[in-house]
Image (tube, grey):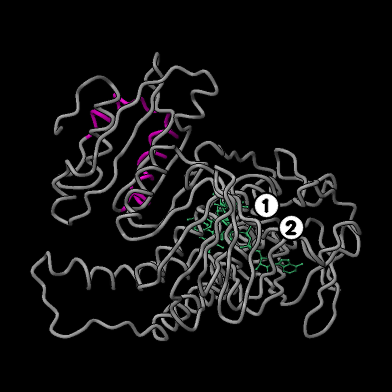
């Protein structure tokens, strides 16, 4: 039987990054993945394919709507080759997952393909092409998450679908009804709206992306409405039925009136749930919470001391970069180091256009915590760079402590804010004040100037270009 210092179950961004760091630190490492490709949800059916389709559909939208403004005329009709678009997306996925094979090889990590399950706290059975058992001194559970649904919905994977199917459709829907105005619903809803589908978002709460700053919800909804997406907020879905190719979604609105939506596809995007099916954690004595997550302490250690868990399968935001940080964290704990993760500084991004990005506390959270704060906001439309590119939607908002001026939260909507948020994370890691950011030189003309201007606004009425 093969023996390892550490075995990792699941090869998503949590698992494969943990494996690399364990190997770097000199541990004999194995990784177990039930699918034939490595990379987990993120690389196969999550972050990477969704961004590939967002980019492709963005190019198309620019060609049909915005090229003309720039004096570019296309003789004849611009057409979508949807099959090719999906094939390109798959090409990007394949290239990326093969990259993980390379990294496993390079770091001398043994890869096992097959379903991993605990026999006991130190033995894992792998049910792949053949059945085999390995012994591991330590194990990291990184089995991720799956889409969740509502009890009365049957996901048929053809017309009543999750994000996984929405990334590989064979045709562009005529009318896609999206249940849930969160990250997946808005990113994929925008892809299909750009490609010509009618898109109706039915959201239970009174705003979209409800966990982000309410100003971001408003700004994104305004921009997406302009793009033609229809929103039905404060709607409680009660039934989803399929009749041949027609889908009917029934909901009650805030006046308790029943409303129905008919379309040809329904995307169910109401969140994801931790995944531990077939893992048999009970054989090792590992505790699972009522919500189905692996229960961990602040060191990401389960109740069984040699078993750890990371990523979507444990508490916290379901984000690839959070899973990666946790993978590095556990590897370093196992090596006897004392790593640290500041969860308050894990940024959240929605890759719609305009993009949405946040780090730290939003206004609602600061009010709830009774923290006195100052707010400085700067609109993208006042930037030369935004006018040059034509991306004038959005703003940067900086919230800083009323007494100390320490930056407590940064919330952005606009072009490329997914990249701009890194400046805010850096500043907050170093506990910068708004004044610190305001006094840093920002290249002109850039979108980043909005960060400086918002910082100037947060320190008093000092914004220069508004
Ligand atoms: P996963 O990536 O889910 O990987 C878990 C792996 O474990 C899987 O490969 C699974 O097959 C394997 N596994 C499970 N059980 C077993 C077992 N018993 N034996 C062997 N293998 C097993 N996050 C972002 O930060 N940015 C984004 O842009 C983004 N976009 C997304 C878009 C979509 C459509 C979706 C669905 C998600 C997106 N996410 C994004 C979220 C991101 O994908 C997850 O947070 C991330 O993949 C979690 O990583 P993980 O390693 O915890 O788990
Ligand atoms: P989400 O939690 O972002 O959004 C779910 C939405 O569905 C919420 O707005 C919620 O209020 C709504 N909802 C819940 N029940 C409902 C009901 N009965 N009727 C109508 N609406 C209802 O979840 P998601 O969009 O499914 O994404 C799942 C996870 O994947 C998220 O946690 C996210 O972190 C991750 N993800 C991240 C990215 C990214 O980082 N860009 C992209 C995609 C997914």
Q: CA distance from mark 1 to mark 2?
A: 6 Å
* Farthest top residue in view: 403
Q: Secondary structure at mark 1?
A: loop
Residue bounds of the magenta highlight: 416-440
**Residue 438: image location, x then y, percent:** 25, 29
- Examine the rendered structure and indicate whether residue 36 appears above or below residue 344: below
Q: Is mark 1 within 8 Å of ligand 1?
A: yes
Instruction: Residue at 33%, 48% (x, y): give it.
Output: 222
Q: Position of residue 441 (x, y in %)?
A: 20, 36
Quadrant of the snapshot with the N terminus: bottom right
Please indicate whether residue 74 sits to the left or right of residue 4 in the image: left
Along the line of sight, the residue nearer the viewer: 117 or 68: 68
User: Which residue corresponds to mark 1?
Assistant: 310
Residue 433, image x, y percentages: 35, 25
The circle on residue 141 is 2
| Residue in the image at 75% along x and 63% along y | 7
Identified at 38% across, 67% down, the residue is 193
CB under 8 Å between discs 1 and 2: yes
């Amino acid at each position: 039987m093969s023996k390892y210092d550490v075995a990792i179950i699941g090869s998503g961004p949590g698992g494969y990054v943990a494996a690399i760091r364990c190997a770097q630190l000199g541990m004999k490492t194995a990784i177990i993945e039930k699918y034939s490709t490595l990379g987990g949800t993120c690389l196969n059916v999550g972050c990477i394919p969704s961004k590939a389709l967002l980019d492709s559909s963005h190019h198309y939208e620019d060609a049909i709507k915005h090229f003309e403004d720039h004096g570019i005329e296309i003789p004849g009709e611009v057409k979508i080759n949807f099959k090719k678009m999906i094939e390109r997306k798959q090409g990007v996925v394949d290239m990326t997952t093969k990259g993980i094979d390379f990294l496993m090889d390079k770091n001398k990590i043994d890869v096992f393909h097959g379903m991993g399950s605990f026999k006991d706290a130190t033995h894992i059975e792998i049910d792949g092409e053949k059945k085999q058992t390995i012994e591991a001194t330590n194990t990291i559970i990184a089995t991720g998450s799956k889409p969740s649904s509502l009890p009365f919905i049957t996901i048929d994977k053809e017309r009543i679908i999750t994000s996984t199917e929405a990334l590989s459709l064979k045709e562009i829907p005529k009318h896609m009804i999206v249940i849930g105005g969160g990250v997946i619903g808005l990113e994929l809803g925008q892809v299909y709206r750009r490609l010509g589908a009618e898109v109706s978002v039915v959201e239970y709460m009174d705003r979209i992306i409800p966990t982000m700053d309410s100003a971001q919800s408003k700004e994104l909804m305004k921009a997406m409405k302009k793009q033609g997406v229809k929103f039905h907020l404060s709607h409680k879905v009660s039934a989803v039925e399929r009749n041949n190719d027609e889908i009917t979604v029934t909901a009650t609105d805030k006046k308790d009136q029943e409303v129905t939506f008919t379309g040809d596809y329904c995307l169910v995007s109401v969140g994801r749930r931790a995944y531990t099916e077939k893992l048999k954690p009970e054989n090792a004595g590992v505790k699972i919470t009522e919500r189905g997550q692996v229960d961990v302490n602040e060191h990401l250690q389960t109740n069984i001391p040699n078993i750890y868990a990371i990523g979507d399968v444990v508490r916290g935001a379901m984000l690839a970069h959070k899973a990666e940080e946790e993978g590095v964290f556990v590897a370093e704990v196992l090596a006897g180091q004392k790593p640290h993760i500041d969860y308050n500084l894990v940024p959240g991004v929605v890759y719609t256009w305009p993009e949405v990005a946040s780090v730290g506390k939003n206004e609602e959270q600061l009010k709830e915590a009774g923290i006195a704060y100052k707010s400085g906001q700067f609109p993208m439309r006042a930037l030369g760079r935004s006018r040059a590119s034509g991306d004038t939607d959005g703003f940067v908002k900086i919230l800083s402590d009323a007494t100390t001026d320490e930056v407590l939260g940064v919330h952005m909507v606009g072009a490329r804010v997914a990249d701009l948020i890194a400046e805010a994370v850096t500043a907050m890691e170093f506990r910068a004040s708004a004044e610190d950011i305001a006094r840093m030189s920002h290249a002109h003309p850039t979108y980043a100037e909005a960060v400086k201007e918002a910082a100037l606004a947060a320190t008093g009425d000092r914004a220069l270009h508004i």
